[in-house]
């Protein structure tokens, strides 16, 4: 391989493009990369295309530096996985030297076809434009203006009775008790404030966020091990929402809680966000698996926070969005310092606290292991004192077997999160075609170029500071996406559909907003009001749009069957969690204990028999523990709770923008014949006997008020009397649990 200086000597003058280089490119390259065909989106007869590169996002030539030019690697390196030309003989040494000399001389292309200098129309996409200046407006003003333009009148306001039940199920995920129904005097503002102040609000709304961040309690894959202490992240979300933690702080703690100046146990638990995805504890290719883990972080963060499908740019520039492979690997560089704490195939936790507390714990641990107070043997203590990378296999085994014993002796609070050791993460390279074995040019940490923001400026201390810089860039008012995405998600969780119906894709291929001015107004209003989710809830809940009836209007439905113009409130089924929680509340068996490790609901033994270890995969059923709210159910990736799965629990392997709402026969079978529903029906019947005595009319009246938050009509009461003549009270309770009205919020 000739150095540039020797090449210059070999060619007395720089190679002439038209005479020397173009014939070679025409003969060996242009069939695949010329005017007629551009494989991998690359043209070799256009200098701009060569400098930009094709799908990989890496420049094909670096003018003046053939050593860094991908074109030379492909034509000269026989060991490269990608060899060009793909057919026919390899280029001769003289031909390769010619290309080297041309590139090192500046790669001039006089007379070559000029690339069309047209602005990329994708850059003008609405979601990438700055938010407008503050202006007066209201939710109903924007919506009603659209309706008035068609001379439509929206559906009338729902009844107070329907609105009260809708409000309770939406905000806290439970129906109003009879006492709460009797107390309500029609003041919705006061009732909203009461509900948002209740701890059940956090339990209801945390589940929405857990869907977005792909929360589960286990790792998936063959062993599907439980993630130790991961439930603390779920509890952190509940507590954060109940405290109305500003959304910009809520995000920052998850992205960089360990890098904050005021880092503490709470913010360190928040960074467990990065570790929530599936994890293969025995990958076939560890290097590739490392990039799969980074891909999980990049894809989740870009979709959850920015509404961008950046994960599609891992192997090549995004085919539809203005997102490049360089954007992707610049984001990978942000996360590159994060490592998964583990001991072989066993995941481990780390101490949580302020920096001073964690340093104290480390000193205490070392002193404890060097002292004589521990009940662990000398060989075990010695194994713990050795750096993990230096332990023998026998010492690793001792550490695995005694980790929990040592934790119990020390009683140091632990958390489940990634860790970043040191201020200088390893270099990040663009991986050609997404392969860990094919590194290309080095890139630094940054946000996608489409955001048109200043480059990240991390301040390194104990860590690189890159994630904190990213969090601050994402929550900057200069970034138009973060506020737009979250207000749209909150709207979706209240109305069933967002103003943008592709809640995690605000790109060119995503849905257009039905009310763009309203979306922008909400985003600005949200930031101006301290990024407060509770204030945003109240703003939406107090609107006429939210308080409308769900009754259909045939003429409007014919023209707008999807209710994009919001002329009525959508009629939609409850998700699995509030549906099951409501049954427990109505039956009188709801265990309101909050926080702590997951619980194991009842699962039929037939569902466990497919496991290789059916006796250990599921803990024994304890009804009182299992009667907690469904947010505390274990989410085991290899075995979802069947009732939750059939009621459309989302796929937890990746971020979920929205739950599906299917209507299939297995739902009816589970809700009528399943163990859970029949068990709650028995408890409901027992409650009715205890509270209403043997009077059938009193039992029917109380059943309707408890389950449906209203009194039965005369016709309903008469029908239930007839039903009870041939059936039991338990059967009536089961029928009520299966009413559409129970499963839907009117």
Image (cartoon, helix red, strand yellow):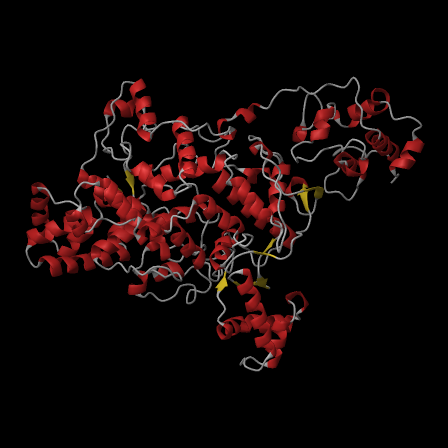
The answer to whether residue 690 is above or below residue 309 is below
Q: Is residue 220 above or below residue 156?
A: below
Inspect this view and state whether residue 725 appears: no
Residue 278, percent from left and from top? 51, 53
Of residues 455 and 387, which is closer to you in this image?
455
Q: Is residue 495 left or right of residue 724?
A: right
**Where 743 sits versus 561, above or below?**
below
Q: Is residue 701 left or right of residue 295?
A: left
Q: Position of residue 454 (x, y in %)?
A: 60, 36
- Residue 459 place in picture, x, y as percent: 62, 48
Q: Quadrant of residue 92?
A: top right
Q: Residue at x 61, y 81 (%)?
A: 378
Of 548 and 743, the residue lying toward us: 548
- Quadrant holding the C terminus: top left
- Where residue 404 appears, as percent x and y from the top left, is 51, 71
Quadrant into which the N terminus falls: top right
Specify whether 440 is left or right of 27.
Answer: left
Between 346 and 78, the residue placed more toward the observer is 346
Q: Residue at x 21, y 56 (%)?
A: 587
Quadrant in the picture for residue 116: top right
Identity of the residue drawn at 25% across and 56% down: 584
Residue drawn at x 24%, y 33% as measured from the top left: 548
Total number of numbered discs in the rendering: 0
One can see residue 412 in this view: yes
């Amino acid at each position: 391989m000739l150095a540039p200086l020797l090449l210059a000597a070999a060619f007395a003058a720089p190679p002439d493009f038209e005479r020397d280089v173009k014939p070679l490119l025409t003969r060996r390259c242009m069939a695949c990369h010329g005017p007629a065909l551009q494989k991998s989106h690359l043209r070799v007869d256009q200098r701009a295309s060569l400098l930009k590169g094709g799908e990989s996002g890496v420049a094909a030539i670096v003018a003046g530096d053939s050593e860094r030019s991908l074109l030379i690697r492909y034509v000269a390196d026989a060991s490269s996985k990608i060899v060009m030309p793909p057919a026919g003989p390899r280029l001769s040494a003289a031909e390769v030297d010619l290309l080297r000399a041309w590139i090192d001389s500046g790669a001039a292309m006089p007379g070559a076809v000029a690339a069309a200098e047209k602005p990329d129309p994708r850059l003008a996409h609405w979601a990438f434009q700055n938010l407008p200046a503050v202006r007066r407006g209201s939710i109903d003003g924007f919506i009603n203006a659209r309706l008035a333009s068609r001379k439509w009148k929206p559906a009338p306001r729902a009844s107070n009775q329907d609105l009260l039940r809708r409000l309770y199920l939406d905000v806290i995920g439970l129906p109003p008790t009879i006492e709460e129904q009797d107390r309500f005097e029609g003041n919705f503002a006061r009732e909203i404030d009461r509900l948002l102040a209740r701890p059940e609000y956090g339990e209801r709304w945390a589940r929405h966020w857990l869907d977005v961040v792909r929360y589960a309690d286990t790792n998936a894959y063959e062993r599907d091990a439980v993630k130790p202490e991961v439930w603390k992240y779920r509890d952190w979300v509940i507590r954060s929402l109940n405290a109305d933690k500003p959304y910009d702080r809520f995000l920052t703690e998850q992205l960089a809680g360990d890098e904050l100046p005021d880092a503490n146990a709470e913010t360190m638990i928040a960074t467990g966000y990065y570790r929530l995805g599936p994890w293969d504890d025995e990958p076939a290719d560890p290097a590739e698996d490392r990039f799969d883990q980074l891909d999980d972080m990049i894809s989740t963060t870009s979709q959850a926070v920015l509404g961008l499908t950046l994960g599609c740019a891992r192997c090549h520039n995004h085919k539809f969005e203005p997102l490049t492979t360089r954007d992707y690997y610049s984001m990978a560089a942000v996360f590159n310092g994060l490592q998964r704490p583990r001991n072989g195939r066993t995941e481990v936790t780390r101490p949580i606290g302020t920096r001073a507390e964690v340093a104290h714990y480390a000193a205490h641990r070392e002193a404890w292991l060097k002292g004589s107070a521990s009940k662990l043997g000398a060989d075990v203590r010695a194994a713990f004192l050795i750096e993990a990378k230096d332990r023998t296999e026998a010492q690793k085994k001792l550490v695995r077997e005694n980790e929990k014993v040592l934790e119990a002796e020390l009683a140091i609070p632990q958390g489940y999160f990634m860790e970043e050791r040191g201020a200088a993460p390893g270099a990040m390279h663009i991986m050609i075609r997404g392969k860990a074995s094919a590194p290309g040019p080095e890139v630094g940490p940054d946000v996608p170029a489409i955001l048109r923001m200043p480059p990240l400026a991390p301040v390194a201390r104990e860590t690189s500071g890159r994630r904190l810089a990213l969090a601050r860039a994402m929550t900057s008012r200069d970034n138009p996406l973060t506020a737009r995405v979250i207000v749209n998600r909150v709207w979706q969780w209240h109305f069933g559909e967002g103003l943008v119906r592709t809640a995690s894709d605000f790109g060119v291929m995503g849905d257009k907003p039905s009310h763009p001015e309203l979306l922008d107004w909400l985003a600005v209003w949200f930031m101006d009001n301290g990024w407060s989710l509770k204030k945003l809830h109240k703003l939406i809940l107090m609107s006429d749009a939210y308080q409308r009836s769900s009754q259909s209007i045939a003429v409007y439905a014919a023209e707008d069957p999807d209710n994009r113009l919001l002329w009525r409130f959508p009629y939609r089924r409850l998700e699995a969690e509030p549906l099951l929680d409501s049954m427990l509340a109505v039956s009188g068996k709801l265990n309101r204990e909050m926080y702590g490790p997951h619980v194991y609901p009842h699962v039929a033994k037939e569902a466990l028999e497919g496991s290789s270890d059916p006796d250990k995969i599921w803990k024994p059923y304890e009804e009182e523990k299992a009667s907690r709210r469904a947010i505390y159910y274990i989410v085991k990736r290899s075995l979802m709770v069947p009732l939750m799965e059939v009621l459309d629990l989302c796929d937890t392997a990746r971020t979920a923008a929205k739950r599906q709402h299917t209507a299939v026969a297995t739902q009816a079978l589970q809700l009528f014949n399943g163990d859970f529903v029949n068990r709650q029906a028995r408890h409901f019947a027992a409650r009715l006997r205890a509270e209403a005595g043997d009077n059938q009319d009193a039992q029917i009246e109380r059943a309707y008020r408890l389950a449906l938050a209203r009194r039965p009509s005369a016709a309903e009461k008469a029908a239930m009397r007839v039903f009870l003549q041939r059936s039991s009270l338990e059967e009536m309770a089961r029928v009520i649990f299966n009413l559409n009205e129970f499963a839907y919020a009117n």
